[in-house]
Amino acid sequence: MNSILSDRINQMEESATLAMAKKARELKAQGIDIISLSLGEPDFKTPKHIQEAAKASIDEGKYFAYPPVAGYQDLREAIAKKLKDDNQISEAKAENIVVSTGAKHSIANVFMCMINEGDEVVIFSPYWVSYAEIIKLAGGVPVLIQGNLENNFKATAAQLEEALTDKTKAIIYSSPCNPTGSVFSKEELEAIAAVVKRRENLFVIADEIYELINFTGKHASIASFPGMFERTITVNGFSKGYAMTGWRVGYICAPVFIAKACEKMQGQFTSGGTGIAQRAALAAILGDQNPSKKMEEAYLKRRDLVLGLLRDIPGVKTHVPEGAFYFFPDVTAFYGKSVEGYTVKSADDICLYLLEKANVSLVTGEAFGAPDCVRLSYAASEEDLIEALKRMKNALSQLK
């Protein structure tokens, strides 16, 4: 029946993170005790004051109609003020903000509005799984520049310069990074900005969705640098830092002509995001930030816990993530090893082996542009993390 479907959907890869999470749920439904470390989803509840704001908005009865396509004006103004105050993006105004149904939707809007057939987009790799597929859907060509374990998985400005061609339309990176947890310093971003500014009509998509989970205390927004506001689309949202994944609220801050284009695109596809969720987002951005700080502290504690447990597994090589809630260890030491007729040839094999043998779900690095690594999410309870790493160590020790 694939011949009935469009080429674009037949050629599109399924999200590896969602696919592994689905497989883990199916095994759990069969009664198997799966510990899922595959999905990038906070295990905390949305803070109470945000929940209460959503309830109050329902009681008001004012937010049941179609919302403005680009988001409610007060929410856009609050986001612009946050970007000025917290990110030093002094040019940000409500007219630069488009609120969408999550950061993923925001990124899709941007690429659909900017990319023509054959345009190239440089992706700092390892990268979040959907970047490349969205670029291809828009008719673009993903061009990867690779960071590695030795440089904390951060590709450099020099690599960017080398990758640029006459067809390059944009670059995209995330910081803190999914899947590696790496954070670009101000100095590293300044070097990237210098390369961008030497090229006419080259734009940056800066994915900052993990901004509030940053253990360095020094988050830098490239749009705040001189000459970069008019070259940058900053992507952010409420899913990670406020534990609001299911509320589906993200946004961009972009030059007005790009913001208007994204509003036009969104008007034809989804219209505005849910009004109740937008009222919750407004409470998140204006209200008490301590719950987010406490979540960040908990993630840091878990990072240190998992770091010690990973270092206790012979053959696993890892760096120290500086943000988000992921480890991205290199598993090449297990290639060629076997147990009970099962031979490991790739990171994919490691993930399947650990799912079947240890009942722990991870995601292969292949999906993130790094085929020799696996992604482990530590957005889970300490109890589950300790048990999962114990199971992994036992299963991996059986490979000879």
Image (tube, grey):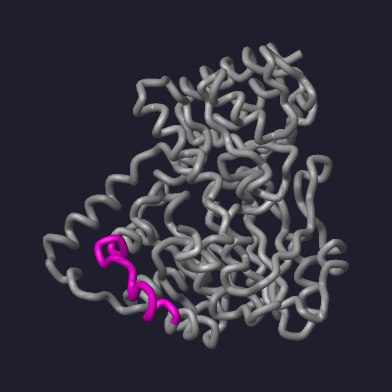
Whether 225 is drawn above or below 388: the answer is below
Image quadrant occupied by the N terminus: bottom left
Question: Viewed as shown, does residue 74 lie left or right of 171?
Answer: left
Q: Nearer the viewer, residue 355 or 149?
A: 355
What residue do we see at 77% from left, 20% from top?
Answer: 337
Q: Nearer the viewer, residue 345 or 351?
A: 345
Image quadrant occupied by the C terminus: top right
Q: Position of residue 48 (x, y in %)?
A: 28, 45
Q: Position of residue 50 (x, y in %)?
A: 29, 52
What residue do we see at 82% from left, 45% from top?
Answer: 151
Q: Looking at the image, which residue sits at the far bottom? A: 257
| Image quadrant where residue 113 sits | bottom right
Whether 240 is drawn above or below 263: the answer is above
Question: Viewed as shown, does residue 279 lie left or right of 317?
Answer: left
Can residue 74 be seen in this snapshot?
Answer: no
| Image quadrant where residue 287 sits | bottom left
